[in-house]
């Protein structure tokens, strides 16, 4: 089971108040342990929304909106993509990450990543094959092939 842990932005993270040395060290240790145990697939912190933009569709036309964005509680300050055996294991890792964060974010949202089976018959055999090939390519790139 794959889960994404989304670190919710706070006024502190949106102001780009640098995390403390303690927080960076502790989060680095948790991330290293996740990597060593094979749980971590990806994870990064994100710059504040004033350095980002959104792309929205209005009446079928794309529209670019530059940050910053007002609703801090709806923004993401970082993420981890993990692969674990259960929801409970995802929760355990999330609790460790939140403790290591020391209040830089306002909490975490944890969501399970959809699999091919979640899309039913609309996910055709051709689409499944393309997805498998895409993942194989990404895995090969990670291995340096």
Image (tube, grey):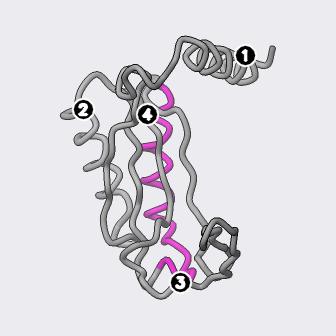
Please give the residue where the numbered disc 1 appears in the rendered image: 140
Magenta residue span: 13-37
Other residues around mark 1 within 10 Å, as few (<14) / some (14–19) / many (≥20)? few
| Viewer-side label of 3, 1 | 3
- Point out the tag, 4 or 1, that comes first from the N-terminus: 4
In the shown orientation, is residue 137 left or right of residue 96?
right
| Viewer-side label of 2, 3 | 3
Other residues around mark 2 within 10 Å, as few (<14) / some (14–19) / many (≥20)? few
Q: Position of residue 62 (x, y in %)?
A: 69, 68
- Point out the tag, 2 or 3, that comes first from the N-terminus: 3
| Viewer-side label of 4, 3 | 3
Please give the residue where the numbered disc 3 appears in the rendered image: 69
Q: What label does residue 89 carry, if any?
A: 2
Q: Residue at x 33, y 45 (%)?
A: 111
Q: Main secondary structure of the magenta part?
A: helix
Other residues around mark 3 within 10 Å, as few (<14) / some (14–19) / many (≥20)? some
- Point out the tag, 4 or 3, that comes first from the N-terminus: 4
Please give the residue where the numbered disc 4 appears in the rendered image: 34
Give the distance between the C-alpha atoms of the residues marked 4 and 2, in whole angstroms.
11 Å
| SS at circle 2 | helix
Q: Residue at x 48, y 23 (%)?
A: 123
Give the distance between the C-alpha atoms of the residues marked 3 and 1, in whole angstroms.
37 Å
Task: Write down the quadrant of residue 15 in the picture.
Answer: bottom right
Other residues around mark 4 within 10 Å, as few (<14) / some (14–19) / many (≥20)? some
Labels 2 & 1 near each other (Cβ < 8 A): no
């Amino acid at each position: 089971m794959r889960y994404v842990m989304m670190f919710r932005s706070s006024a502190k993270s949106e102001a780009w108040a640098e995390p403390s040395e303690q927080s960076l060290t502790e989060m680095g240790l948790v991330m290293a342990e996740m990597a060593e145990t094979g749980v971590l697939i990806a994870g990064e912190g994100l710059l504040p929304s004033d350095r980002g933009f959104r792309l929205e569709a209005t009446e079928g036309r794309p529209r670019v909106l530059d940050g910053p964005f007002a609703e801090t509680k709806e923004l993401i300050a970082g993420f981890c993509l993990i692969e674990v055996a259960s929801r409970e294991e995802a929760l355990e890792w999330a609790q460790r990450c939140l403790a290591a964060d020391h209040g830089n974010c306002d909490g975490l949202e944890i969501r399970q990543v959809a699999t091919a089976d979640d899309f039913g018959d609309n996910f055709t055999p051709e689409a499944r094959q393309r997805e498998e090939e895409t993942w194989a390519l990404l895995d090969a790139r990670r291995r340096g092939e």
